[in-house]
Amino acid sequence: MTSDGPFPEDPTETRVEILKATDAALRRHGYADLTIDRISREFPKSKSLLYHHYDSKDELLLDFLGYLLTSFEDGLGLDPDASPHERLTTLLNRVLDPASDRDDDAFRRAITELRVQGASDEAYRQQFTEHDRLLRDRMADIVAEGVEAGVYREVDPDQVAAMLHTLASGSMVQTATSDADARAAVRAELDAYFEHRLLADGR
Amino acid sequence: MTSDGPFPEDPTETRVEILKATDAALRRHGYADLTIDRISREFPKSKSLLYHHYDSKDELLLDFLGYLLTSFEDGLGLDPDASPHERLTTLLNRVLDPASDRDDDAFRRAITELRVQGASDEAYRQQFTEHDRLLRDRMADIVAEGVEAGVYREVDPDQVAAMLHTLASGSMVQTATSDADARAAVRAELDAYFEHRLLADGR
DNA sequence: CCGCGTTGACTGAATATTCAATCAGTTATT
DNA sequence: AATAACTGATTGAATATTCAGTCAACGCGG
């Protein structure tokens, strides 16, 4: 049995290879230059085989997007023993930590490029709508726990989560598309926000 | 003399027509389906003429991006008589106001699609890096004024601006690429942030 | 004022390339 | 022998780019 990276078991080993090839090609060339030919060049088998497993390029990419978002969501797994505030900051640091490696950057870039296809493509947009809702709800749950535990003030968890999630989105896009890196400053100001707005006084 | 919208005088009337046509085609079809042919269909003259004025599609689009960002930056003009806090909220409302019309949406979408080309295209990336720096600095200036005037606490203006600008970026991308609209919640939480973190106590 | 050459804006048709998709066939598996 | 996995060559459409040539304006020497 070969468990390979974030990829599931072998129900269809070839599909996994295709997804990996797509991932590699996307990172290497970017979405705009992502062609079937380039995907097949990262793929040990033939180009036509892609069409044996998928009806069209669109279908392949949509499947890939689903896999990417799912693995993103799963990779978020937080230590359930940690305190709410610890979990929240861990989550945010995943996005806001400026000490990212090349792999993180490529991943951010890939997901950002895919996201923006949702500006004109209904199927992509739906995927990201769901993804956004899921992330925001998770954040809201954590905040709600914090409020319940008395660590946070009596804030509206949805409202706080909306802002934090939007901030995370913004940081991702900026990092992927501009060299004006603001992550350190954002992280610092976020701490101030926690201090003044979120954390209960009697600690 | 014909002054037409945000477009400058007629040094080269035709260039202006080309930029307008590009704008129209981009809004109508989205970046992925933006072809020279479609641009030329929005353009009263011939397709080949585009190549008389630009060497390539790339060059045309880059020129267009420059124009778009400049007109964005110019359109920000704030009432210099307004108080710092008024100017800051006006600026943020430009992005965060959920009551946007179709034109705003199309504009946001267009600029977002262009931005993300900067994930793989160095020339685009440079433009957006500059653009980001400019916006962030403007925000920082306003915050600094607020601090000086005693309306705001003794915060680090750059740090606050970094966060606000990142938040604005995030809201733009989300609005353009997902139906999970968080603007109202973000706006509300932002007010809480102002209240608890930014505004001086003795008002 | 007249021809005439030059230039730049402009056009319609042609070309070259890229790329998704297909197909006719082969190999492996059961 | 039937089915699924797989391949290499090919096709047709979309699309950026080029090209050969027209037209109108302008300058200028006769």
Image: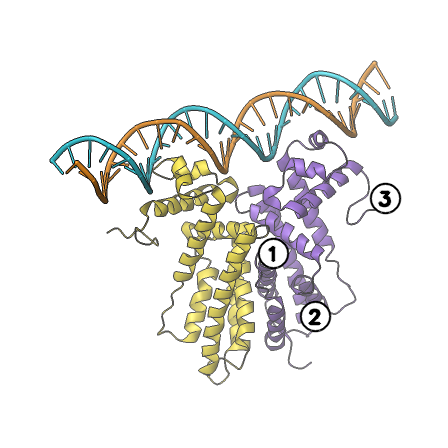
Chain colours: A purple, B yellow, C cyan, D orange
Residue topped by disc 2? A85
Q: Position of residue A189 (x, y in %)?
A: 59, 73
Give a yes or no on whether discs 2 and 1 share a subunit.
yes
* B180 lies left or right of B138: right
Residue most toward the bottom? Answer: B202
Q: Residue at x 62, y 50 (%)?
A: A130
Q: Secondary structure at mark 3?
A: loop
Query: Eyeballing the image, is A50 above or below A135?
Result: above
Kindly identify the amino acid type of the residue bearing the numbered disc 1: Ala
Residue topped by disc 3? A2
Give a yes or no on whether discs 2 and 3 share a subunit.
yes
Q: Earlier in the sequence, mark 1 or mark 3?
A: 3
Spatial separation of the CA atoms under disc 2 and disc 1: 27 Å
Q: Secondary structure at mark 2?
A: helix
Of tags 1 and 3, which is closer to the observer? 1
Kindly identify the amino acid type of the residue bearing the numbered disc 3: Thr
Query: Eyeballing the image, is A111 above or below A193?
Result: above
Q: Secondary structure at mark 1?
A: helix
Q: Residue at x 52, y 77 (%)?
A: B198
Q: Residues within 10 Å of mark 2 (few under 14, many from 20)?
A: some
Q: Chain of mark 2?
A: A
Q: Residue at x 39, y 61 (%)?
A: B74
Of tags 2 and 3, which is closer to the observer? 3
Q: Position of residue B94 (x, y in %)?
A: 44, 61
Q: Chain of mark 3?
A: A
**The C terminus of chain A - image quarter:** bottom right
Q: In which image quadrant can residue A194 be found?
A: bottom right
Q: Chain of mark 1?
A: A
